[in-house]
Structures are given as structure tokens and as C-alpha cells.
Amino acid sequence: VSEGMIMLCTKCILAPHTPADGIRISVMSRHTLSDGITPDVRISQKSFTYHFSAFGPSARLIGDYYKHGLPFEEFAERYYQEMSAPHVLMYVRRIARVALCSTVTLLCIEHDPFFCHRQLLAALMRMEVPELEIAHCW
């Protein structure tokens, strides 16, 4: 992504922060290690502009995916079900509209965006606002 372009981006929260990131939104349910309790010291308030934990997968969904080998296609289907709550969709639409005027970067811990809920969330935002441009940054 070049500076000056407006779009919706996705990125690992541990990747270097750049001015082109614009508004950095953590979409993680929590900022902890895999035990779900111990804070991940690699993530600080400086890592993101806002934290919307409602965009993170539920603890049960995370457990089924990482601990029980839930296939990503099933993970995606269940994630979209979780995101279908009216109060969550309201924020999906709002952030998607903001991304038409200002660059927004969705952040999660996964390095590969293609097996991460942030790309599913970006796709959901694009369904709500079809003219959104999406970039998955490394």
C-alpha cells in the first residue's frame, strides 16, 4: 500500500507500523498468549488505534480451530454467523464507510491473512460497501 491511497488493509499486529496504515484497528478478541490469560507483551496500546474485540472470534471458535482442527471453511462459516449479530453488523458497516475516506488497517496476530479472520472481516465489510478496495499487507 502506498502512502496516500485510501483502502481497507489487513495486517499482522506485530508487523511494523507505517504511516500508510492509517487507522489501525485490532480485531482480536484478546491480546493474550494462547493460554487466553497471559498478556502478550509484544502488543501494547501503541500497536493499534482502536480495539474492537467484538470482531474477534469467540473463545469456543478459536479453540475448535486451533485445538480441535476445525477446517478453515467451517471456521469461516461459523465466524460469519458470529458477525451476523445486529450490533456487530452496525460497526462493520460504520468502519467500512470510514475506509472509503481514510485508510483503515484491520490487525490480528496471524501472519498469513488468508487463514485469519481479519480477511473474512474485510470481505464482510466489502459485502456491505462493495466499492471498498482491500489489500492484505505483510
Image (tube, grey):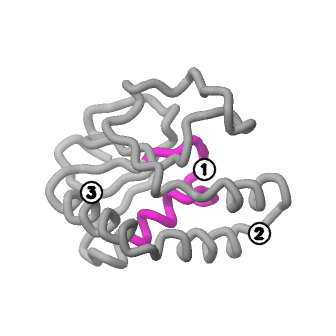
The residue located at (60%, 27%) in the rendering is: 40
Magenta region: 107-124
Q: How crowded is the residue under tag 2: few (<14 C-alpha within 10 Å), some, or many (20+)?
A: few
Q: Which of these two is toward me, 30 or 66?
A: 30
In the image: residue 25, left or right of residue 23: right
**Whole-Å distance between the Cαs marked 3 and 2?**
29 Å
Which structural element holds mark 3? loop
- Which residue is identified by label 1? 112
Tell me how many marks there are: 3
Q: Quadrant of residue 69?
A: bottom right
Circles 1 and 3 in contact, beta carbons < 8 Å? no
Q: Which of these two is toward me, 59 or 120?
A: 59
In the image: residue 116, left or right of residue 2: right
In the image: residue 125, left or right of residue 137: left
* Residue 18 appearing in the image: yes
Q: Position of residue 18 (x, y in %)?
A: 33, 32
- Which residue is identified by label 2? 71
Q: How crowded is the residue under tag 1: few (<14 C-alpha within 10 Å), some, or many (20+)?
A: some
Q: Quadrant of residue 101?
A: bottom left
The residue located at (56%, 23%) in the rendering is: 42
Which structural element holds mark 1? loop
Amino acid type at image mark 2: Pro
**Whole-Å distance between the Cαs marked 1 and 3?**
19 Å
Question: Mark 3 vs mark 2: which is more N-terminal?
Answer: 3
**Whole-Å distance between the Cαs marked 2 and 1?**
16 Å
Amino acid type at image mark 1: Asp
Q: Which mark, by number, is residue 7?
A: 3
* Residue 123 is inside the magenta segment: yes
The residue located at (21%, 65%) in the rendering is: 97
* Residue 102 is inside the magenta segment: no
